[in-house]
Amino acid sequence: MPAYHDLTPKNMSYEEVSQWNGKEMKEMSQYLLGVVTQSLQGGSPAQRPIFNHAIECTWALLEFYMYVRSKSHHAATLSYMEDALRRFHTFKDVFLLGQAGKKAKAKANALRMELVKKRKVAEETNAETWMPSKKRREMNAWRDYISHEMDVSKELDADLNFPKIHLMSHWVEQIRRYGALEQYSAERHEQTHKTNLKDGWNASNHNLNYLPQVITFQGSILCFEVRELNL
Protein backbone atom coordinates (compact mmCIF):
# COMPACT_ATOMS: atom_id res chain seq x y z
CA MET A 1 0.00 0.00 0.00
CA PRO A 2 1.28 3.51 -0.73
CA ALA A 3 1.76 6.01 2.08
CA TYR A 4 -1.43 7.74 3.17
CA HIS A 5 -2.63 9.99 5.97
CA ASP A 6 -3.23 8.12 9.27
CA LEU A 7 -2.02 4.80 7.81
CA THR A 8 1.24 3.19 8.90
CA PRO A 9 3.24 1.63 6.02
CA LYS A 10 2.94 -2.17 6.07
CA ASN A 11 6.07 -4.31 6.02
CA MET A 12 4.30 -7.69 5.96
CA SER A 13 1.52 -9.24 3.94
CA TYR A 14 -1.86 -10.02 5.50
CA GLU A 15 -1.05 -13.71 5.96
CA GLU A 16 2.27 -12.98 7.66
CA VAL A 17 0.68 -11.02 10.54
CA SER A 18 0.31 -13.46 13.44
CA GLN A 19 -1.27 -11.05 15.94
CA TRP A 20 -3.21 -7.85 15.34
CA ASN A 21 -3.05 -4.99 17.82
CA GLY A 22 -5.69 -2.28 18.21
CA LYS A 23 -3.99 0.24 15.92
CA GLU A 24 -3.52 -2.30 13.15
CA MET A 25 -7.17 -3.36 13.43
CA LYS A 26 -8.32 0.25 13.08
CA GLU A 27 -6.15 0.81 10.02
CA MET A 28 -7.16 -2.47 8.44
CA SER A 29 -10.85 -1.60 8.84
CA GLN A 30 -10.35 1.43 6.60
CA TYR A 31 -9.44 -0.54 3.49
CA LEU A 32 -10.60 -4.13 4.11
CA LEU A 33 -13.98 -3.75 2.38
CA GLY A 34 -12.39 -2.22 -0.70
CA VAL A 35 -9.84 -5.03 -0.91
CA VAL A 36 -12.50 -7.73 -0.45
CA THR A 37 -14.81 -6.15 -3.03
CA GLN A 38 -12.03 -5.83 -5.60
CA SER A 39 -10.78 -9.37 -4.94
CA LEU A 40 -14.24 -10.91 -5.43
CA GLN A 41 -15.04 -9.27 -8.76
CA GLY A 42 -16.08 -11.59 -11.57
CA GLY A 43 -16.37 -15.30 -10.92
CA SER A 44 -18.69 -17.88 -12.38
CA PRO A 45 -22.50 -17.60 -12.11
CA ALA A 46 -22.38 -20.18 -9.30
CA GLN A 47 -19.75 -18.16 -7.41
CA ARG A 48 -21.44 -14.77 -7.67
CA PRO A 49 -24.00 -15.34 -4.84
CA ILE A 50 -21.20 -16.58 -2.55
CA PHE A 51 -19.01 -13.59 -3.39
CA ASN A 52 -21.90 -11.17 -2.83
CA HIS A 53 -22.68 -12.71 0.56
CA ALA A 54 -19.02 -12.44 1.58
CA ILE A 55 -18.98 -8.74 0.62
CA GLU A 56 -22.28 -8.10 2.44
CA CYS A 57 -21.02 -9.86 5.57
CA THR A 58 -17.75 -7.90 5.58
CA TRP A 59 -19.64 -4.65 4.97
CA ALA A 60 -22.06 -5.30 7.85
CA LEU A 61 -19.29 -6.26 10.29
CA LEU A 62 -17.20 -3.17 9.50
CA GLU A 63 -20.29 -0.95 9.72
CA PHE A 64 -21.04 -2.38 13.16
CA TYR A 65 -17.41 -1.85 14.18
CA MET A 66 -17.48 1.79 13.05
CA TYR A 67 -20.65 2.52 15.04
CA VAL A 68 -19.24 0.81 18.14
CA ARG A 69 -16.23 3.13 18.07
CA SER A 70 -18.42 6.26 18.18
CA LYS A 71 -17.77 8.56 21.13
CA SER A 72 -21.50 9.27 21.61
CA HIS A 73 -24.72 7.48 20.72
CA HIS A 74 -28.43 8.07 20.36
CA ALA A 75 -31.42 5.92 19.41
CA ALA A 76 -30.67 6.09 15.68
CA THR A 77 -27.04 4.94 15.95
CA LEU A 78 -28.02 2.06 18.23
CA SER A 79 -30.68 1.07 15.71
CA TYR A 80 -28.06 1.15 12.94
CA MET A 81 -25.79 -1.05 15.07
CA GLU A 82 -28.54 -3.62 15.57
CA ASP A 83 -29.33 -3.62 11.85
CA ALA A 84 -25.66 -4.09 10.93
CA LEU A 85 -25.32 -6.96 13.40
CA ARG A 86 -28.48 -8.60 12.02
CA ARG A 87 -27.07 -8.39 8.47
CA PHE A 88 -23.77 -9.84 9.66
CA HIS A 89 -25.50 -12.87 11.20
CA THR A 90 -27.59 -13.29 8.04
CA PHE A 91 -24.55 -13.65 5.76
CA LYS A 92 -21.86 -15.00 8.11
CA ASP A 93 -22.45 -18.64 7.11
CA VAL A 94 -20.58 -17.93 3.89
CA PHE A 95 -17.38 -18.15 5.96
CA LEU A 96 -18.18 -21.51 7.56
CA LEU A 97 -15.73 -23.34 5.29
CA GLY A 98 -12.93 -21.24 6.77
CA GLN A 99 -13.92 -22.41 10.26
CA ALA A 100 -13.68 -26.13 9.53
CA GLY A 101 -11.37 -27.73 12.09
CA LYS A 102 -9.12 -30.77 11.83
CA LYS A 103 -11.93 -33.22 12.60
CA ALA A 104 -14.22 -31.65 10.01
CA LYS A 105 -11.49 -31.71 7.36
CA ALA A 106 -10.58 -35.32 8.20
CA LYS A 107 -14.22 -36.33 7.87
CA ALA A 108 -14.50 -34.51 4.53
CA ASN A 109 -11.33 -36.21 3.25
CA ALA A 110 -12.71 -39.62 4.25
CA LEU A 111 -15.91 -38.80 2.35
CA ARG A 112 -13.82 -37.80 -0.65
CA MET A 113 -11.97 -41.14 -0.66
CA GLU A 114 -15.29 -42.99 -0.54
CA LEU A 115 -16.72 -40.97 -3.43
CA VAL A 116 -13.54 -41.41 -5.48
CA LYS A 117 -13.93 -45.19 -5.10
CA LYS A 118 -17.52 -44.95 -6.35
CA ARG A 119 -16.36 -42.86 -9.28
CA LYS A 120 -13.75 -45.46 -10.21
CA VAL A 121 -16.36 -48.23 -10.04
CA ALA A 122 -18.69 -46.26 -12.33
CA GLU A 123 -15.80 -45.55 -14.71
CA GLU A 124 -14.78 -49.22 -14.89
CA THR A 125 -18.38 -50.39 -15.31
CA ASN A 126 -19.05 -48.07 -18.25
CA ALA A 127 -15.55 -48.01 -19.76
CA GLU A 128 -16.63 -49.91 -22.88
CA THR A 129 -19.88 -48.02 -23.52
CA TRP A 130 -18.78 -44.44 -22.81
CA MET A 131 -17.49 -42.38 -25.71
CA PRO A 132 -14.52 -40.05 -24.95
CA SER A 133 -16.81 -37.00 -24.83
CA LYS A 134 -19.29 -38.82 -22.59
CA LYS A 135 -16.47 -39.94 -20.30
CA ARG A 136 -15.14 -36.36 -20.06
CA ARG A 137 -18.59 -35.01 -19.13
CA GLU A 138 -19.09 -37.72 -16.52
CA MET A 139 -15.69 -37.10 -14.94
CA ASN A 140 -16.37 -33.36 -14.77
CA ALA A 141 -19.74 -34.05 -13.17
CA TRP A 142 -18.14 -36.37 -10.62
CA ARG A 143 -15.47 -33.79 -9.83
CA ASP A 144 -18.07 -31.08 -9.17
CA TYR A 145 -20.19 -33.50 -7.14
CA ILE A 146 -17.26 -34.57 -4.93
CA SER A 147 -16.20 -30.96 -4.35
CA HIS A 148 -19.77 -29.99 -3.44
CA GLU A 149 -20.18 -32.89 -1.01
CA MET A 150 -16.89 -32.08 0.70
CA ASP A 151 -17.94 -28.44 1.18
CA VAL A 152 -21.31 -29.54 2.59
CA SER A 153 -19.59 -31.94 4.98
CA LYS A 154 -17.22 -29.22 6.23
CA GLU A 155 -20.07 -26.74 6.72
CA LEU A 156 -22.13 -29.23 8.71
CA ASP A 157 -19.26 -29.83 11.14
CA ALA A 158 -18.12 -26.19 11.34
CA ASP A 159 -19.64 -23.34 13.34
CA LEU A 160 -19.07 -19.71 14.24
CA ASN A 161 -20.08 -20.10 17.88
CA PHE A 162 -17.22 -18.52 19.79
CA PRO A 163 -17.20 -15.83 22.51
CA LYS A 164 -16.18 -12.77 20.48
CA ILE A 165 -19.11 -13.12 18.08
CA HIS A 166 -21.54 -13.80 20.94
CA LEU A 167 -20.34 -10.76 22.91
CA MET A 168 -21.34 -8.44 20.06
CA SER A 169 -25.00 -9.17 20.80
CA HIS A 170 -24.59 -7.51 24.24
CA TRP A 171 -22.88 -4.30 23.16
CA VAL A 172 -25.99 -2.31 22.29
CA GLU A 173 -27.52 -3.03 25.70
CA GLN A 174 -24.23 -2.18 27.42
CA ILE A 175 -24.11 1.17 25.62
CA ARG A 176 -27.69 1.91 26.66
CA ARG A 177 -26.84 1.20 30.30
CA TYR A 178 -23.31 2.59 30.66
CA GLY A 179 -22.64 4.90 27.72
CA ALA A 180 -20.21 4.79 24.77
CA LEU A 181 -17.63 2.01 24.81
CA GLU A 182 -14.88 4.45 23.89
CA GLN A 183 -14.52 5.40 27.56
CA TYR A 184 -13.60 1.78 28.40
CA SER A 185 -10.78 1.60 25.84
CA ALA A 186 -7.71 -0.19 27.19
CA GLU A 187 -5.37 2.11 25.27
CA ARG A 188 -5.34 4.71 28.06
CA HIS A 189 -4.51 2.07 30.67
CA GLU A 190 -1.78 0.62 28.48
CA GLN A 191 -0.29 4.08 27.95
CA THR A 192 -0.38 4.81 31.68
CA HIS A 193 1.17 1.43 32.45
CA LYS A 194 3.91 2.06 29.94
CA THR A 195 4.65 5.50 31.39
CA ASN A 196 4.76 4.19 34.95
CA LEU A 197 7.22 1.47 34.04
CA LYS A 198 9.48 3.83 32.12
CA ASP A 199 9.49 6.41 34.92
CA GLY A 200 10.22 3.73 37.50
CA TRP A 201 12.99 2.24 35.36
CA ASN A 202 14.60 5.64 34.82
CA ALA A 203 14.53 6.25 38.59
CA SER A 204 16.17 2.88 39.37
CA ASN A 205 19.86 1.96 39.29
CA HIS A 206 19.24 -0.28 36.25
CA ASN A 207 20.56 -3.38 38.03
CA LEU A 208 19.02 -6.84 38.31
CA ASN A 209 17.00 -5.79 41.36
CA TYR A 210 15.26 -3.01 39.44
CA LEU A 211 11.74 -4.43 39.91
CA PRO A 212 11.45 -3.70 43.69
CA GLN A 213 12.81 -0.23 42.98
CA VAL A 214 10.15 0.39 40.32
CA ILE A 215 7.40 -0.75 42.70
CA THR A 216 8.76 1.41 45.53
CA PHE A 217 9.02 4.42 43.22
CA GLN A 218 5.44 4.04 42.00
CA GLY A 219 4.21 3.50 45.57
CA SER A 220 5.88 6.74 46.65
CA ILE A 221 4.37 8.67 43.74
CA LEU A 222 0.94 7.25 44.53
CA CYS A 223 1.25 8.20 48.22
CA PHE A 224 2.11 11.80 47.31
CA GLU A 225 -0.85 11.95 44.90
CA VAL A 226 -3.26 10.61 47.52
CA ARG A 227 -1.84 13.06 50.08
CA GLU A 228 -2.33 15.93 47.68
CA LEU A 229 -5.95 14.93 47.05
CA ASN A 230 -6.61 14.72 50.79
CA LEU A 231 -5.19 18.18 51.36
Image: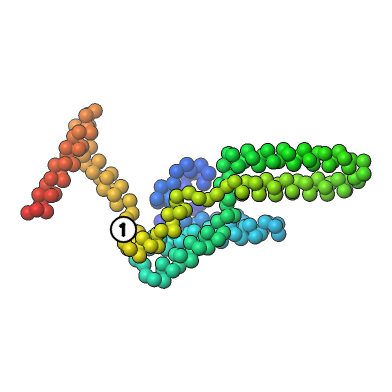
**Camera-side residue: 17 or 144?**
144
The residue located at (74%, 48%) in the rendering is 145
The residue located at (70%, 57%) in the rendering is 46
**Looking at the picture, which amino acid does disc 1 mark?**
Gln
**Residue 77 x/y as whole percent:** 41, 68
**Residue 87 x/y as whole percent:** 53, 63
Circle 1 residues within 10 Å: few <14, some 14–19, many ≥20: few
Name the residue furthest top. 208
The residue located at (71%, 41%) in the rendering is 112
In the image: residue 101, left or right of residue 141: left
In the image: residue 131, left or right of residue 193: right
The residue located at (52%, 59%) in the rendering is 89
User: Is 167 rendered above or below residue 198?
Assistant: below
Name the residue furthest left. 231
Q: Secondary structure at mark 1?
A: helix
Image quarter (top left, top right, bottom left or bottom right) of the C terminus: bottom left
